[in-house]
Image: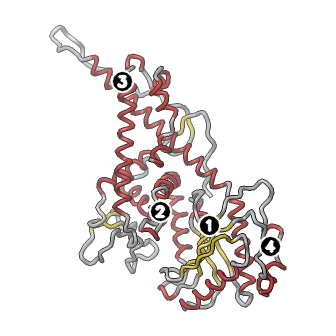
Amino acid sequence: MPKLASKSSSCVSENGTSGQKPTIAKSLRTTHKLSLASPSIDFEAITTAKVKNIVKEYFDNKFTKDIYNHVEQMTNQSNHLTNARILVYKRLDHCIAWTFPMYNMKTKIFGSCATGLALVTSDVDIAVSGIETYDRPTLCECLSTISEVLKSFKWVISNKPILTAHVPVLKLEIDPCLAFDETFENANEDPRIRDILFSQASEFNLGEGEENMTVKVDLTLEGLGMLGYTVHMGYKSTEFAEKMLAKHKSLYIITMVLKEFLFNRQLLNTYQGGISSYCLIIMIVAVLEKYGDEGYMKSLRRIMKFYGEEFQPEKMGITLSENDPFFPLSHSYETAPLWILDHNNLVERRNVGQGAYSVKVILYEFARVSKIIDLLHEKLEELVLQHKCKVQKVEDVELIDDIELKRFIESNLLSQLIMC
């Protein structure tokens, strides 16, 4: 699982490593000699241009550090839930195995909790294998059976099977603080529940002082041959994410930032017309491969600016199989709000963005926040130029005695942008 290094007093570089504070670039020097006939030189303009360069360097350094610190905090918050998530997984694995003793049932975590890209609000994605059928009604019946068994336990506080979805899913919310053996009245009359409780282990309960936030779970079944797949697509998307994380050094931080950004706007939910994490990763990687990895701060700004101002979903599609990841949509492509070719199924030209009916809202939000970043840069420039006679190098910016400027410096820019 990717982990961020701890904060230090040193400056954070674009690639997420720590180093010495950057030194100001050498000022440009005039190479010609002045004569009595030489035109007058506007030293005021030269000073202003020099201070603007200093401000740009300071802003880029600050924004880079703010992104790093914010994502480090996000990662730590999510990691605090690791024990609770593992415990929930063990409880469900145990219950499912004893519900279907006739099958060799196996469960596996996939998605963001497997790749390390989980927010504190992320669901735990669990796939169940071992059912020897590709028949949809049978799979739905198995999901319903699991749902029915789990209704006996008080620690399952929400239990909703969605059997009409493209991929049938059982959505659960679990309180790991409640003891595993806490059941509702008459639950022991069911022999399956008796077997489950009889074989329970002490590790199914949280230890004292462990994080006790409720955990959301999406439970699906492997064996969706009726959809044209013989392998659970969650496994493939997880493998894809892990491969891209190894390839692009900035992908982890950028993905975490944009996941939280979209989640706070209810746009990281395919059930409500948003996009999936899988789609988001493809969108990010497409820009990284087109323009190169410029470091997480610059690449994040480029991604938001590109999708907010240049990308046209009605005319352009996204794929990672071509030299140019953005291709023109021809008449052979069916009408869809967003075309993103599934990297795991390029032969059939499967579109994983077909349900993204809120794509225009996503692009608008990217454009809006991209402009706010530019305005923040201009605001810092305005504040510093009021004291430009005191600024000779980057470090001087923080020495200026100005209340509004100090307030700007002490704030975390990214935290503001995510919430705005």
Circle 2 or circle 3, nearest the eye = 2
Above/below status of 335 relative to 85: below
Q: Which of the 4 image quarters holds residue 355?
A: bottom left
User: Which residue in the protein does label 2 denote?
Assistant: 268
Q: Amino acid at mark 2?
A: Leu
User: Which residue in the protein does label 4 denote?
Assistant: 181
Circle 4 or circle 2, nearest the eye = 4
Task: Say which label, 3 or 4, has the lower sequence index.
Answer: 4
User: Which residue in the protein does label 1 denote?
Assistant: 216
Residue density around tag 4, few if under 14, some if 14–19, many if 20 or more, within 10 Å: some
Find numbered disc 4 in the image and state the secondary structure of the residue it sits on.
Answer: loop
Q: How far apart in space, not on screen, are marks 4 and 2 (Cα)?
A: 35 Å
Whole-percent x, y for residue 9 in the image: 60, 33
Q: Amino acid at mark 3?
A: Leu
The image shows a total of numbered marks equal to 4
Circle 3 or circle 4, nearest the eye = 4
Residue density around tag 1, few if under 14, some if 14–19, many if 20 or more, within 10 Å: many
Give me the residue at 58% from left, 62% from top.
122
Residue 58 located left or right of residue 29: right
Residue density around tag 2, few if under 14, some if 14–19, many if 20 or more, within 10 Å: many
Residue 177 in view = yes
User: Decide: marks 4, 2 in contact (CB < 8 A)?
Assistant: no
Above/below status of 100 relative to 41: below
Task: Say which label, 1 or 4, has the lower sequence index.
Answer: 4
